Image: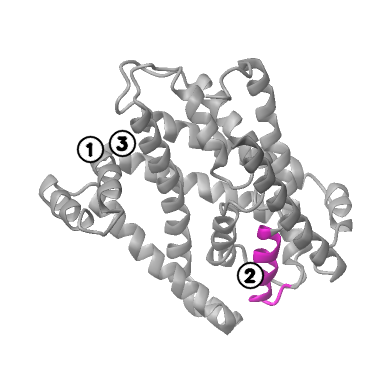
Amino acid sequence: MLKICMIRTFLKLLFAGGLLYWLISSGKLDLSLIKKSFEGGPQWIIALFLIFAQAVIGTFRYKILLETKSSKPLPFLQILRLNYIGFFFSSVLPGAVTGDLIKLVYVKKIDHSFSKSFLVTITLLDRIIGLAGLLFLAGIFSLLNFREISLLSPKIIPIITLNLFLFCGTLLFIGILISPLKVQKKLLQIIIKIPFIGLKISQLVEQIFALRENRKDIINCLMLSCFAQFLGILAFWTISSPFYSGHLPFQYAFTFIPVGLISTAIPISPGGLGVGHVFFANLFSLVNIDNGASLFNLFFLCNFAHNLIGVLPYLMSGKNSLPE
């Protein structure tokens, strides 16, 4: 099994490397921009601080969700340390969510009363709420700036339409999550009828619905998620905006950068390496900016440098937990 995983990881890295080679050879990825960004001002320091603030807020959100079933208050710094372990593995292994699987092993040690199913459910819900915050921002800014950005570039209309559709889906999901028990039971009865996978999905959804009594916590987590995602996009803007090949107002960035960030969660390459570069090259081209891959590369390296901090708490925690 280990050999198969290593082979898959190698093939994914090879695929990401192939994408990067194509981007560089075709002139879509300008590596000299890295040096220029270091020489251009304090953008890296500001962006790193914003990413760190985003991590702190995300830790508060995860702590709130864990404490819905915890037998005692959980230490914030310990959860922050485990989150950084997750960040580290998400950056060196394919997919932005990969680190969550490894983090679960360590979270279990904080409170032994946590069941494995609860930890998987809460970690999944944390990711969903994080995604909901991103989609919420994209939907709100797309709604507010629909006319202006459509005039700026008609090619981006499909992205705006997608944002609005996902925004409505996000509102529906949050509404169901905090809806009365009667409504949730009816939905579970529909889900369980899905062939082959209905029972498994209904069991997972039922555990998420069990948090209906913690409606206030869920709403607070959604608000924290929106703020954290705002800081993440602001970090992207801070480090990349001095090098835009065309004019793009700050608020317009919220209409397509979230779509690119979601693409980095696809478990193909570490941290969206290669895949994110291609996505952002195409997304920025929709608003007449032709160096999108190079712009994402700056954010990728900044985010990667931040996530590498997680190797320190991992080494301090000991490696015996990882085989679990």
Picture quadrant where residue 274 is located:
bottom right
Give the magenta part as a residue range. Answer: 275-289
Q: Taking the image as drawn, is residue 267 in sight?
A: yes
Query: Could you say which is closer to the camera, residue 254 or residue 193?
Result: 193
Answer few, some or many: residues within 10 Å of disc 1's Cα (few below 14, many 20 plus, some between 14 and 19): few
Q: Earlier in the sequence, mark 1 or mark 3?
A: 1
- Residue ID for mark 1: 210
Q: Which residue is mark 2?
A: 283
Return the disc, 2 or 1, that comes first in the chain's sequence. 1
Label 1, secondary structure: give it. helix
Quadrant of the snapshot with the N terminus: top right
Distance, label 1 to label 3, CA atoms, is 13 Å
* Residue depicted at 87% across the width and 54% down the height: 36
Characterize the magenta stretch by its predominant secondary structure: helix
Characterize the local packing of mark 2: few (<14), some (14-19) or many (20 or more) Cα atoms within 10 angstroms. many
Looking at the image, residue 187 lies above or below residue 87: below
Q: Residue 11 placed where, x, y %?
A: 70, 52
Q: Quadrant of residue 314?
A: top right
**The disc label shown at residue 279, or none:** none
Taking the image as drawn, is residue 57 in sight? no
Q: How many C-alpha atoms fall within 10 Å of the one at disc 3: few (<14), some, or many (≥20)? A: some
Q: Relative to 315, is 199 above or below?
A: below
Task: Evaluate if marks 3 and 2 touch, with contact meaning CB atoms under 8 Å apart.
Answer: no
**Which mark identifies residue 217?**
3
Q: CA distance from mark 2 to mark 1?
A: 39 Å
Distance from the alpha carbon under mark 3 to that under mark 2: 35 Å
Report whether 149 appears left or right of 65: right
What amino acid is labelled 1 in the image? Ala
Amino acid, disc 3: Asp
